[in-house]
Amino acid sequence: MSLVLSILAVIALFLIVMIAVDSNRFVTVYYKLDTGKSDRYTRIAFLSDLHSKSYGRDNAKLLDAIKEVSPDLILIGGDMVTASRNQKIEGALSLTERLKEDYPVYYGSGNHEQRLMLYPERYPGVTEKLESQLSDQGIIRLRNTEAEVQDTQITMSSVEIERAYYKRSKPPMLTAEKMREYLPGERQEGRIQILLAHNPDYFKAYRDWGADLVLAGHVHGGIVRLPFLGGVISPNLTLFPKYDGGEFKEEGSVMIISRGLGSHTIPWRLFNPGELVVIDVR
């Protein structure tokens, strides 16, 4: 019995150490996508689900990693802050300010930015501060809007779906027709259509809408990752979600899901460090 208890104690200690390590580090992961629509590559650094975490003083480690990969532009997939009563958004704003000094920055919404906006009585003044400072910094804020990326053949869009689509039980089905209500513009032939869509569960709708590349987050890699099984649980409490992180391809469209950089409800990660995603798109 004492041997069994000793083994269990060693395993518990190992897991505690790994949680401490993986909850406070990130890795850089690389993808390459050739759309056949351009003759040159554009390097994108994609950030998602930071939840106000800081890697080093003023996110110095994250900024150094971004500088090292030399992106042409920064795309932000939402949830850089957390909708909570004691939330501090200064860290995320400091990061975007530093990024804008060196790169074009496009910022889409996650469900937490959306929650801050929808419930101002719970979070008085937070949305106004966030949005006004992003505007003052020169961040290109995308909310059911699109923008052409200068000196490239990329058109950036971001969809902010209604909160019902994040429900834990029986969310509605998102369709391409509904996507066209959010983003009604015609897709331009010959241009690379990149869509920031925080929730990856609706890849089919994003694909049918016309996205060449979907960039998503939200799932945090499944919190815990297991060999051969992948992420364990999604925010809507789905076990072993299909879309937990990495690259997925369906009928000519590609979705890359960041495992995120931070955490919130479950404030730790196991065998699942944060991710800085780098994508070379041609």
Image (spheres, rainbow, N blue to C red):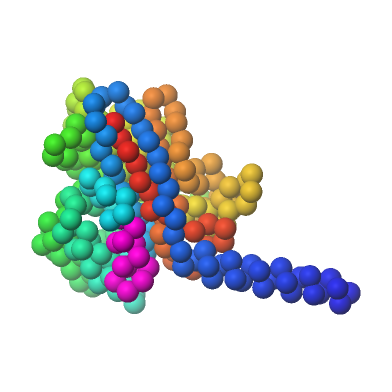
Q: Nearer the viewer, residue 8 or 220?
A: 8
- 159 left or right of 272 in image: left
Would residue 22 be seen by someone viewing this image from the given angle?
yes
Q: Quadrant of the N terminus?
A: bottom right
Q: Nearer the viewer, residue 72 or 12?
A: 72
Would residue 83 be seen by someone viewing this image from the given angle?
no
Q: Quadrant of residue 50?
A: bottom left
Total residue callouts:
0
The residue under the point 73% across, 72% down is 10
Q: Residue furthest front?
A: 68
Percent across and percent down for residue 36 are: 30, 23
Q: Which residues are magenta?
A: 54-66
Vertical relation: 198 (above or below) 150: below
Looking at the magenta stretch, what is its main secondary structure?
A: helix
Q: Is residue 143 magenta?
A: no
Percent across and percent down for residue 32 are: 37, 36
Vertical relation: 48 (above or below) 257: below
Q: Nearer the viewer, residue 274 or 146?
A: 274
